[in-house]
Amino acid sequence: MPGFLRRSAAALLLLLLPLFAPPARAEVPAARLATLARGVNFTNWFRFPPRQDDAHFRDYIDDATLAELHRAGFTFVRLAVQPELMTDRGGRPDARRLALVAAAAARIERHGLGVMIGWHPQTWHLENSPAEQQELQDLWSALAERLRALDPARTFPEVMNEPIYPKQEPQWEALQVKVLARIRAALPQSTVILTGTDWGAIDGLVGLHPVADGNVVYSFHTYDPPTLTSLGSFEPSLDHAALARLPFPVVGAHDCDAAEQATTQPRTRDVIRFYCSEHWDAAKLRGLVDQAADWGRRNHVPVIAGEFGASNQLPPATRFAWIEAMRRAFEADGIGWCLWGYDDSMGFDIHPYRHPRLPLDPGLLRALGLAHHA
């Protein structure tokens, strides 16, 4: 970054420091944190929808599904909304589509669940686009107005999913404060979900300055280690079938032999060896989660794990062991969690149009500590 830009960014941060001053105490009501204890993401209702007609946006998730999730012990759902679907051809908020989002949120709440609602952009590059930054603010102004009729104790606006902003943390924090102000103008009593940079990862969270508004919760996402949970999707050329044979936990020196012998690709073998050298187990996952929890304690603010999950291409025993270990780490630190997702292969992988009445996987429910509800 050129020197004059660094000076400008520093000056901007100084002007905004009063907004980032940490509150003296967390002001989120305990009942709301209890509502944010156990969640599941809806990933394809208003994001990458298989259809884009009004009937889909009204009925993709039916009342029976919402009732089943509540009975299973889930306390909230996270509703992913793709902003590209919520604007007209001129880039202005689409009132009809936004009304459908608000109606879905209201129906979720009628089933006794909280609802976290946030933007999940697919084409935005906020770091370099003032126009998209403005669109984010305008969309929140429009949607927040439609959420005013909902119960503020169950309605949790989330500023945005997984901002990137590499080495531009002050710029993201400044934008997040502006968006928070837009939300507060219409929803003064709702608890708002904020996040850090670096795709909302733990590293992004711990680099964040808390805002002065105490009625907020800070979110992070974790899929560590992605070599296991996403079968190395960060590198498409890897032998993903071999990675599906990785163990969790890693206990002995030869635990990865089966995975290594399943491939002839030198690069995949190197990745497998590196994974096993790190000795991933429940204690290592707990150490990662502790970083987020420690940041929350230092700043006197609550945090939540807004996403976690593992590919269903893993053997069930391996997959459920990772999910249970991660869930136990969250709960040991008093952190609410939200599985990705109901209709995604990292979670239950239930797609209403293909198998509308498929029951919730009992093995996954056990890993989530919810088997006693089923």
Image (spheres, rainbow, N blue to C red):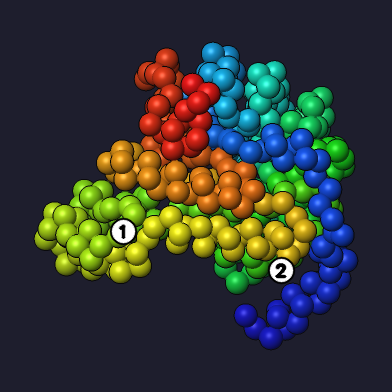
Q: Is residue 42 above or below residue 10?
A: above
Residue 255 at what x, y percent from top left? Answer: 22, 58
The answer to whether residue 26 is seen in the rendering is yes
Of residue 162 and residue 88, the one placed in the foreground of this image is 162
Q: Is residue 174 above or below residue 305?
A: below
Q: Is residue 331 left or right of residue 260?
A: right
State whether residue 305 appears in this view.
no
- Image quarter hosting the N terminus: bottom right
Callout 2 secondary element: helix
- Tag on residue 170? 2
Q: Nearer the viewer, residue 367 or 109?
A: 367
**Which residue is depicted at the point 34% across and 54% down?**
249
- For marks 1 and 2, the one nearer the N-term is 2
Identify the element where label 1 is drawn: loop
Q: Residue furthest bottom?
A: 3
Quarter of the image where one finds residue 67? top right
Q: Quadrant of residue 70?
A: top right
Amino acid tagged 1: Val
Depth order, front residue of 373/142 = 373
Q: Is residue 62 left or right of residue 189?
A: left
For this view, does 93 lie left or right of residue 145? left
The mark found on residue 345 in the picture is: none
* Residue at the spot 68% in from the left edge and 44% down from the top edge: 158
Q: Position of residue 132 (x, y in %)?
A: 66, 52
> Which three-letter amino acid code belongs to the residue tagged 2?
Pro
Instruction: Tell me the CA gap for discs 1 and 2.
Output: 39 Å
Q: Which residue is mark 1?
A: 250
User: Within 10 Å of the Cα at label 1, are there few (<14), some (14-19), or many (20+) other Cα atoms?
Assistant: some
Residue at 51% over, 30% down: 370
Q: Position of residue 287 (x, y in %)?
A: 51, 62
